[in-house]
Image (cartoon, rainbow, N blue to C red):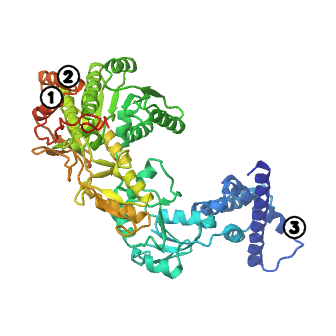
Amino acid sequence: MDKGREIKRFFILALTDYLLIYASYALGMYFRYGIFSLNEPEFFQNGAFFSLIVLLSLIVNGTYRVSWSYANFRDFWIILRSTLIGYIAGFLFGRFMLLFDVKIFTVPITVSTMTFIGATLLIIWSRIFWLTYLFLRIDREGGSSDKLLIIGAGDAGMSIAEEIMRNPSYGRIIGFLDDSPRKRGKRIHGLPVLGTTEMVMDLVEKHNISRVIIAIPSASSEEIRRIMSLIDLKKVQVQTLPGLAELMNKKASLGYLREISVEDLLGRETVSVEKNELRKFISGKRILVTGAGGSIGSELCRQIAELSPAAIFLLGKGENSIYEIESELKSAYPKLKAHRIIADIQDEHRMEYLFSTLQPQLVFHAAAHKHVPIMEENPTEAFRVNSLGTYTIARFADKYHVETMVMISTDKAVNPSSIMGVSKRLAEEMLRAISGKSETKFAMVRFGNVLGSRGSVVPKFKKQIQSGGPVTVTDPRMTRYFMTIPEAVSLVLQAGALASSGEVFVLDMGKPVKISDLARDMITLAGYVPDQEIEIKYTGIRPGEKLFERLSLQGEAFEKTPHPKIFKLKSGKRLSSEQLEELVSKLKKAVEGSDFNGLNSLIKEYVPDATAQIETTIPELGKKGELQK
């Protein structure tokens, strides 16, 4: 709104309110003195001055700065407060002027009280009439024929209802559903609470509802699953508000509606972290994030940036992903010192130069190869990056006195059946060995699959569903732990703050989920019927995969930490300095020479619980003879 229109609006509202106040005064005089004589000038003068004082109170208290199109109870309270202050000020001013024998400001207490009550009611009602007119006009001009039903009659439900009522182009709200007995049968913002969530499909069919909105940001994934099981997605579209985690991480606002996602069904739980503790851990420090362009690395950067680091160094091998995360951070945090570094973590000369020049105080090591079947075909690359690359980062973290280094590990390091899992397990053993003689605090954080990460089944299933299926699942019995990326990263940061001497931290991943159930949920959310419209095809377990994952080894005990979702493992014996040097030397030699027999011997020697072995008849880039075809 331009300045001229704003001034015009102010004068119209102020004049209207002045006339309403004066009308209240006239009524007060009438009820106090009966039919009054127009020959008494004090009647007009006293009322004019008293009304002016009340109007000045309205102005000073900010009544005319309120946008009444978006008014709520607190805005109407401003009117009550303003008229009350004006009433008291006008009455006392009139009594004060009597001391100087000036009577034109004096209003009897009964009249001034009736003026206060009448003016308050009339001004509030004028705003209500104005809002009603606005809603009716908007409804006539751009109202949608869509009928909406909101599940959740709490603060979030009321907020989205207000937003929709102000913008009828979204549709018309029929009412709320809520399982709280005290809300049943009530009206909220003029809209009825029609019943419980169990009644959703009855009401959808009765009122021809086109959209159901789930407005419960605090709902757990189990609660969302329960509600979704009651809704026939072929008959009605379902949308939801963002969860508390999204709101807290500023990834969405309360008025933002989106489709239900698989993340809502599997990982909507809110993770509470000690923000003050994390701020002390991060704030004012130089931080290096390896693999900064990846799923976990980029989310680490986002959450670190929010905690006011002195500088953040974004290290990665892919220039495009580093460019994207740096651009995103600069847009969200213009004052943040973010530096792009393109490098290979196994390049020792480059890494030493970076550590000696940048002098990072904290290192979050997320760079790794994570795709299990691909690492089975490229084993030396798994060991080169995941094991030796991690050793290089840890060695320089120790040499250049980094305060804390946190490595992102995996549940696949436990009883590893894959080369990727073995390479991560060796990296853990190397860090534990270095931590025994270092001032740097090392920590490793194990967790399972993260929803939506690159290479995870979720993007793969989405593409398969979009192309009409089939959705391929390796085995109907296969289960995995799942966690959202923001949740996992929040806990990684918290674990870093708890690090002291080479601990392995394990995140509480909740209940394991069957991959086949995940596939069915995603097919259903897409509006199809599993096994009828979209086939689920079982393809058999791939090399290196396990049916079930574990988060700890046989004999490893969990210890509690100050955070309820982070546990510390009581780990066994660490490698000595001599054993570490021997392992690194042998591993380098085997990797450089593509010596698969040597790598298999190292697996047997240093990871005796592993079932993974490299098939020595398979060259790194394909089965024997495949490249010659």
Q: Position of residue 81 (x, y in %)?
A: 62, 60
Q: Is residue 55 left or right of residue 516?
A: right
Question: Element under label 1?
Answer: helix
Asked if residue 131 can be seen in this view, the reply is no
**At 49% across and 73% down in the image, what residue appears?**
176
Amino acid at dot 2: Lys
The reply to whether discs 2 and 1 touch (Cβ–Cβ < 8 Å) is: yes
Compared with 289, 214 (above or below) is below
Nearer to me, 577 or 400: 577
Instruction: Return the residue at label 2.
Output: 589
The secondary element bearing badge 2 is classed as helix
- Residue 295: quarter of image: top left
Badge 1 vs badge 3, beta-carbon distance below 8 Å:
no
Residue at mark 3: 41
With respect to residue 357, does 116 lie above or below? Answer: below
Q: Residue furthest front?
A: 629
Q: Position of residue 33 (x, y in %)?
A: 77, 77
Residue 143: x percent and y percent? 65, 69
Q: Estimate the spatial distance between the alpha carbons at disc 2 and disc 1, rounded to whole Å.
A: 9 Å
> Between marks 2 and 3, how big is the CA–CA gap?
109 Å
The residue singled out by tag 1 in the image is: 598
Q: Earlier in the sequence, mark 2 or mark 1?
A: 2
Choose the circle earlier in sequence order: 1 or 3.
3
Residue 174 visible in rendering: yes
- Element carrying mark 3: helix
Check disc 1 and give the amino acid type: Gly
* Count of numbered labels shown in the rendering: 3
Q: Residues within 10 Å of mark 1 (few under 14, many from 20)?
A: some
